[in-house]
Amino acid sequence: MKLTGSTVTMITYLLVGLTAFCCSTIKGVEGNELKLRAREKMRKDRAERQLQADNAGLVFSRGYVCITRPQDFAFVIPQQQSIVPEDLGDLNLLGSSTLQSGGIYDPADVQIVDRLGTSAADNFLDDTSGADTSGTGPRGQFAGQRQPKFIPQKDPGFFFNGECVATQVRGALILGHSCLLNLCLGGGGYNCLAIYAGSKFVFNPLEQVLFSPTTFTDDEDRVLSPNNPGSIVPSLPPSYPGTIIGGTGLFVGAVGYVDVTTITGSTLTPARVIVADDSILNADFPQAGYITQKINVVTNVPLPVAP
C-alpha cells in the first residue's frame, strides 16, 4: 500500500495528538492522586483534632518509674561572688540547679530492695578505684536506704529529663523551686509531655554533709570524724506537683498534672571540706547509687504502657 505525503502527515498528527492526550491524562491522574492524598491527610488531621476535643473531658492516668544513673544527674551551685564561704553552711544556693536525664520503665518491671549499709556492696576503697569487697572499707549509706535490684533495658524513646532551679532559699536551705521537664513516652522520643513545676520545695541537699565533717572516714576511733558517716542516712527530697502545659507528637494539646516522688537516692554529697586557700570543695569519693522516682500522670490524652 502506497502512502501519500498528506496521509503520512495526518498519521503523524494523530500520533502526536494521542501522545499529548496520554501524557495529559497521566498528569491529570497524578494530580488527582495528590489532591486525594492531601484531602485524606486533612480529613485525618480533622479527625484527630476532633478526637482530642472529644477526649477533653476524659481522664487518663498511668504511673511510671524513672531511674537516673549518677553520671546523668548534676547539682550545680552558682559562683559565690558576695562572700568567700569558709563552711558549707555559708553557701547561698539561690539559682542552684539540678539537671537529670533518666529512663522510663513500667513499675511492674522495677523491684526496690533495702540497702541498709550492712553488706560489702556498700563499702568503698580508700581511693576511687572501685568497691571494697573485703567488708572492712569505708561504708556509705544510700538516701532512703533502698536501691533498685535490677534495671531493665532502656527504650531510647522513653525518658524523663529537665532542670529544676532553686528560686527561694535561706542560705543552704532550698525553700522553693521552678522546673521545666520533659516526659517522653514513645514515638522515637518525639511524643513528649511538657511539664512545669513551680511550688514550695523545702530541702537541704547539704544537711547530712554539715552533720559529718567527712563523707567517709578510715579512722577506727572516730577521732577525725566523731559522727560516723556510715550511720548518717541522706534525706530524700520531698515530692512535688507539676502541671502539663502541652506536648509534642501525639501529645499536642495535652493538659493535666503529674506528681513526682523520689523513692531512692545516692550516697552523701562528696563534699568534705572547703580549702581556705583556694575556696574549692574537696571530695574524696564520688557519689554512688541510682535515683528512682515514681511519676503519676493524669491527662486528657491516652497514655502508653512503658516498655
Image (spheres, rainbow, N blue to C red):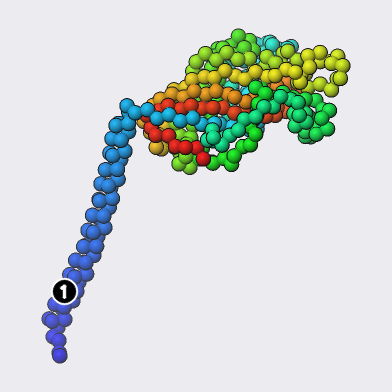
Give the answer, above or below, for where 89 lies relative to 245: above
Give the answer, above or below, for where 12 lies relative to 259: below
Residue placed farthest to the top in the image?
170
Residue 13 screen position, x and y as percent? 16, 74
Question: Is residue 161 found left or right of 137 in the rendered image?
Answer: left
Q: Residue at x 15, y 90 (%)?
A: 1
Q: Residue at x 60, y 15 (%)?
A: 203
Give the answer, above or below, for where 40 lies relative to 80: below
Residue placed farthest to the bottom in the image?
1
Q: Which residue is mark 1?
A: 14
* Residue 153 occupies quadrant: top right
Question: Is residue 121 found left or right of 219 in the rendered image?
Answer: left
Question: Is residue 1 found left or right of 119 in the rendered image?
Answer: left
Residue 107 screen position, x and y as percent? 54, 33
Q: Residue at x 86, y 20 (%)?
A: 220
- Which residue occupies the foreground of this view, 304 or 272? 304
Query: Could one spot residue 294 in this view of the protein?
Result: yes
Q: Amino acid at mark 1?
A: Leu
Residue 241 screen position, x and y as percent? 49, 20
Q: Residue at x 51, y 27 (%)?
A: 295
- Which residue occupies the foreground of this view, 148 or 189? 148
Residue 133 screen position, x and y as percent? 80, 34
Question: Is residue 287 found left or right of 12 in the rendered image?
Answer: right
